[in-house]
Image (cartoon, coloured by chain):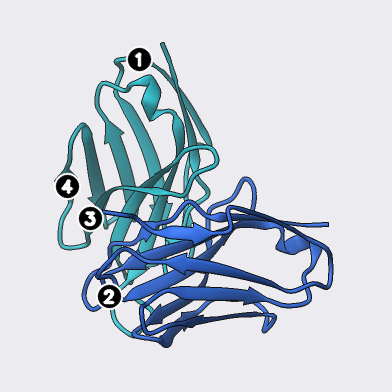
Chain colours: A cyan, B blue
Amino acid sequence: GENVGLHLPTLSVQEGDNSIINCAYSNSASDYFIWYKQESGKGPQFIIDIRSNMDKRQGQRVTVLLNKTVKHLSLQIAATQPGDSAVYFCAENRAGGTSYGKLTFGQGTILTVHP
Amino acid sequence: DAGVTQSPTHLIKTRGQHVTLRCSPISGHKSVSWYQQVLGQGPQFIFQYYEKEERGRGNFPDRFSARQFPNYSSELNVNALLLGDSALYLCASSAGGSSYEQYFGPGTRLTVT
């Protein structure tokens, strides 16, 4: 079936290190991917997105990599800070039709940054 | 600019009751989507509305319904509440059309006892 999942449910890093959060997806029809950060008691916060016609996109301290061959998505956070501690979700969407507003979320990875 | 707003913040209901949750999208956004997030899991898609029309429905029972108003705000209604309906209900807005970016509100925490 269609699903978006994460390899690791938890990730602990030291402040200043780089973090890599991974995500696997199974729907080859997916053409849009988003990473969200969710802090306790808050709604998901948009971090960065990427379309399937790209394999890399950079933002401020974050980079998303997309490997369509193996259906793998990753989020890299440079110089991780304690404020980056949160749950990170990948989500996918599929072009076409009318339900473009339907995001399918993965399980989530808990990132803990130690000072 | 104000982001997505939702009300109420928290809500406690008993089994069998009905609940209405409200969402106001980002100014200029015409699409609203609703998600249910059970503790420890990712959000699950419930509905999407664009220009007051339902554009998508997730795998939820008919007890769940929604609508969108001319000002693009939206309501999610849940009838005959079950304990399993306890969750964080999230609203996300997007510009619609060819825009895929969705921005989430803070959610409404519903507890069914």
Characterize the local packing of mark 4: few (<14), some (14-19) or many (20 or more) Cα atoms within 10 angstroms.
some
Foreground tag (2 vs 4): 2
Q: CA distance from mark 2 to mark 1?
A: 38 Å
Which mark is drawn over residue B96?
2
Please indicate, yes or no, whether residue A28 appears anywhere in the rendered image: no
**Who is closer to the viewer here, B8 or A96?**
B8
The residue type indicated by label 3 comes to: Ile
To the question of a shared chain for discs 1 and 3, the answer is: yes
Badges 2 and 1, same chain: no
Q: Callout 1 environment at 10 Å: few (<14), some (14 to 19), or many (20+)?
A: some
Q: Quadrant of residue B25?
A: bottom left
Query: Tag 2: residue type?
Result: Gly
Residues at marks 4 and 3 on the same chain? yes
User: Where is A99 relative to A70, above or below?
Assistant: below
Label pair 3/2, CB-CB below 8 angstroms:
no
For the image, the number of numbered tags is 4
What is the C-alpha distance between the residues marked 2 and 4? 24 Å
Image quarter where the C terminus of chain B lies is: bottom right
Is residue A42 shown above or below B112?
above
Q: Which mark is residue A56?
A: 4
SS for tag 3? Answer: strand
Q: Which residue is mark 1?
A: A15
The disc at residue A50 is: 3
Among the two numbered marks 1 and 3 on one chain, the one whose residue lies closer to the N terminus: 1
- Callout 1, which amino acid? Glu
Q: What is the secondary structure assignment of the residue under circle 2?
A: loop
Q: Is residue B19 left or right of residue A58?
A: right
Q: Chain of mark 1?
A: A
